[in-house]
Amino acid sequence: MSDGLRGKRVMVTGGSGFLGSFVVERLKKRGCSDILVPGSGEYDFVNMDKVIKAYDDFKPEVVIHLAAKVGGIGANRKYPGSFFYDNLMMGVQLMEIGRRRGIEKFVAIGTICAYPKFTPVPFKEDDLWIGYPEETNAPYGLAKKMLLVQSQAYRQEYGFNSIYLMPVNLYGPRDNFDPESSHVIPALIKKCIEAVKAGNQEMVVWGSGSATREFLYADDCAEGILLATEKYNGAEPVNLGSCHEISIKDLVVILARLTGFTGNIVWDSTKPDGQPRRSLDTARAQESFGFKASTGFEDGLKATIDWYRRRQLT
């Protein structure tokens, strides 16, 4: 695929979602005019008949599989069964039918939650199998991890060209701000802004604040995915990250400052922290297809806060 994606029929599952919207925009900028985005209402990929229908209707040459059932710690603890089953079945069936149809390439988007709970930091792809994932998100992480097993097995037996990418925690405009299912940055932005509006002098945050995370701006992630789609044809998994690790406590301090919250922050240590540390080694992505994140963390946070505030006014 050295000639890029121009002229290719590219199906982006989850293309109308958070990350997917940025991937579709960047595909258009690359001159890819035949972009296929199956609607989640008509194409439920947990159902094999709907997977077959999508391939029949769209006849893609390349599939970028972004569709997923996702959420924060609370949602993962509440729905472990459905998070496991839905994510496993969507990915396995989409890759299997893609193989049968002889598509040129399948791009599987995994998750950083696939890593073991106590992975040495920074996380290196070669350490992916040294232990069990953090318990609160293990069902989701393992379901997505099976796509790597499938990808490598299909490459070995069928010569099928599929790749597996693992983005770190994403954030940015258009993120999910629903408190029942949102991830940490949108959840904290919403909490800070609502506390400011209400004039609260105290804000309660889950956990101890000691856990660390790495965050990747969604538009940067989209660029990484497309660079890999164009240039990477290897069997090994690849991290996509920003190389910037920050504690949740420090993150809350920054968000409070950017949103104008000046009250006290109270940590509810009865709630889980999740994985103790999360930071990626991104050398493979840079060496294999030239990806390096370009958005500064505070710049990305400001853009996300501004987008959320504008949406609140509409």
Image (spheres, rainbow, N blue to C red):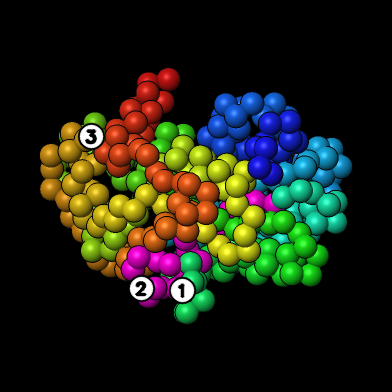
| Residue 46 appears in the picture as rendered | no
The Cα atoms of the two marked residues, 3 and 1, are separated by: 38 Å
The Cα atoms of the two marked residues, 3 and 2, are separated by: 34 Å
Which tag is nearer the camera, tag 3 or tag 1? 1
Q: Amino acid at mark 3?
A: Thr
Q: Marks 2 and 3: in contact by CB < 8 Å? A: no
Q: Marks 2 and 1: in contact by CB < 8 Å? A: yes
Neighbourhood count class around disc 1 (C-alpha, 10 Å): few under 14, some 14–19, many 20 upward: few
User: Residue 99 lies in magenta, yes or no?
Assistant: no
Q: Residue at x 71, y 38 (%)?
A: 10
Instruction: State whether residue 153 is above or below residue 167.
Output: below
Q: Position of residue 102 (x, y in %)?
A: 83, 52
Instruction: State whether residue 163 is above or below residue 171.
Output: below
Q: Considering depth in this image, is 308 or 158 the residue closer to the camera? A: 158
Query: Which quadrant is home to the C terminus?
Result: top left
Residue indicated by mark 2: 120
Q: Residue at x 75, y 36 (%)?
A: 9
Q: Which residues are magenta?
A: 106-124
Residue 231 placement, left or right of 9:
left
Residue 225 placement, left or right of 95:
left
Q: Residue at x 47, y 63 (%)?
A: 113
Q: Which mark is residue 127?
A: 1
